[in-house]
């Protein structure tokens, strides 16, 4: 079975009954870009994948192929992240990523309602959290914050390594789009 990001994106979009144009409008990602992604003609940045999964009501891991140390990382302005594992606690999906941050600032737009993030610093010092309320953390320190508001990541010293937990809340029937816990 083809497990590329493009194949997963097309399957997820079609499963939601969305056209390319509808997904482009909902995500703010250009229709041509989505088409190129679905046809594996271009790679996607982390911010693009988050915009698409937010519009589709799915976790980031629905588009990230595989999990574990052999998996290719997805990258953003400051973050390079690799999916390590995913599991369900009650009705909440949790995805674990190992990420490296650089000193470039990563501006993340709000994710879907109810998503929370927990960042634990493994090496280095970082600034992270909701925009305007960021906190500085060092090795061994953690912060859990709402991911459904704009937030930032950046290393303060060269590069830093972190573990990022994405906590996806259960979806109710009144919300649009499936939260693809088992994809």
Image (cartoon, rainbow, N blue to C red):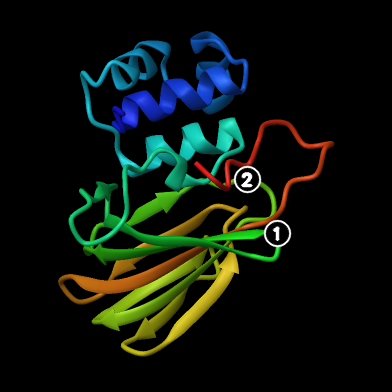
Q: Position of residue 53 (x, y in %)?
A: 51, 37
Residue 28 in view, yes or no:
no
Residue 166 in view, yes or no:
yes
| Label 1: element kind | loop
* Picture quadrant of residue 105: bottom left
The disc, 1 or 2, on the residue closer to the chain's N-terminal end is 1
| Label 2: element kind | loop
Label 1–label 2 contact, CB within 8 A: no
Q: Residues within 10 Å of mark 2 (few under 14, many from 20)?
A: many
Q: Position of residue 162 (x, y in %)?
A: 32, 73
- Compared to residue 12, the image places residue 152 above or below, namely below
Nearer the observer: mark 1 or 2; the answer is 1
Q: Residues within 10 Å of mark 1 (few under 14, many from 20)?
A: few
Q: Position of residue 54 (x, y in %)?
A: 56, 38
Residue at x 40%, y 80% (from the top left corner): 136
Which of the numbered marks, if any, corresponds to residue 112?
2
Q: Which residue is mark 1?
A: 91
Q: What is the CA distance from the residue labelled 1 to the residue labelled 2?
A: 16 Å
Residue at x 59%, y 15% (from the top left corner): 18
Q: How many marks?
A: 2
Q: Position of residue 11 (x, y in %)?
A: 47, 23
Q: Is residue 124 left or right of residue 48?
A: left
| Quadrant placement of the N terminus | top left
Identify which residue, 147 or 42, lies in the foreground.
Answer: 42
């Amino acid at each position: 079975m083809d497990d590329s990001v493009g194949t997963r994106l097309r399957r997820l979009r079609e499963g939601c009954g969305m056209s390319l144009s509808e997904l482009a409008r909902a995500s703010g990602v250009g229709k041509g870009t989505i088409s190129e992604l679905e046809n594996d003609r271009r790679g996607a940045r982390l911010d693009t994948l988050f915009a698409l999964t937010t519009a589709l009501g799915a976790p980031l891991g629905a588009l990230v192929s595989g999990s574990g140390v052999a998996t290719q990382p997805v990258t953003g302005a400051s973050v390079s992240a690799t999916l390590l594992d995913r599991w369900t606690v009650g009705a909440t999906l949790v995805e674990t990523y190992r990420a490296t941050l650089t000193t470039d600032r990563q501006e993340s737009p709000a994710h879907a309602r109810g998503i929370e993030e927990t960042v634990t610093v493994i090496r280095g010092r970082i600034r992270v959290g909701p925009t305007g309320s960021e906190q500085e953390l060092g090795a061994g320190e953690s912060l859990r914050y709402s991911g459904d508001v704009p937030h930032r990541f950046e290393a303060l010293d060269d590069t830093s390594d972190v573990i990022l937990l994405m906590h996806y809340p259960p979806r109710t029937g009144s919300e649009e789009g499936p939260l693809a816990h088992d994809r």
